[in-house]
Amino acid sequence: MTYRFVAGLVALGAFALPAAAADMNAGYGYGYAPAAQPMSWTGFYIGANAGYSWGSSGPYSPGGFLGGLQAGYNWQFVGSPFVAGVETDFDWAGISDGAYSLNYFGTVRARLGFAFERILAYGTLGFAYGGGQFEVLGLSNNQTHGGWTIGAGAEFALDRNWSARAEYLYVDLGSSTYNSLIGPATLGFDGNILRGGVNYRF
């Protein structure tokens, strides 16, 4: 009788100890960690950029630095690497040659991209505008240009909120007629923009 009682206790312990050990491990965080959530580009963002531009304006070949701000919104389709978005930006510029200069530049663009987890490669197309100045003998005339832009870029997510990017845009701002002491001058601007930037994503 005693032998059977002891054998029963041993058998009960053999089943109970592993279960208790499993419960202890789970209680102290030694179980399996939950799967990480996939990266998503959906949401609003704001940021800053700086770069260089060069191009042509009639007989002039203006070039120079620019810098400013951007804001936009991305939609990443559920279960898909495709990302669509809209963005607007405004840059102060020092793009000049001879009598002509472009003092500011901005765009409103659509973006369509493909996400590789932390990397987003995209193309972009939209409206562009800028403020030009023509100065002769110390007197200047300012005009607003309107046109279009097309380009491409890539963005890298540094963490959940911050990302860095590089972007190229081709810009055609059309032509405007400037008045001067030597008569009217019809000038536009078409050229290239290379810039880098950072975004904060909400």
Image (cartoon, grey):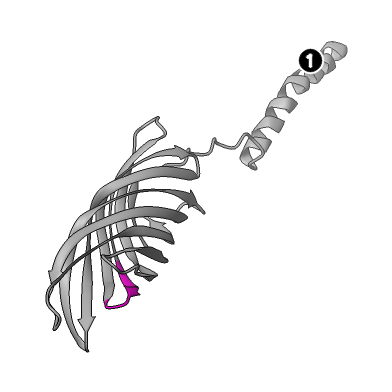
Q: Provide residue 78's location: percent of width, then percent of height.
A: 36, 32
The answer to whether residue 154 is above or below residue 103 is above
Q: Quadrant of residue 200?
A: bottom left
Between 112 and 174, which is closer to the camera in this rendering?
174
For this view, does 173 lie left or right of residue 162? Answer: left
Between 52 and 111, which is closer to the camera in this rendering?
52
Q: Which residues are magenta?
A: 91-99
User: Where does label 1 land, which residue?
Assistant: 8
Q: Provide residue 72's location: percent of width, then percent of height.
A: 30, 53
Q: Secondary structure at mark 1?
A: helix
- Residue pictured at 79% horizontal, 15% vertical: 8
- Residue pictured at 26% horizontal, 65% vertical: 58
- Residue pictured at 23% horizontal, 59% vertical: 173
Name the chief secondary structure element in magenta. strand
Taking the magenta stretch, the answer to whether it contains residue 45 is no
Taking the magenta stretch, the answer to whether it contains residue 94 is yes
Query: Label 1 sits on what residue type?
Result: Gly
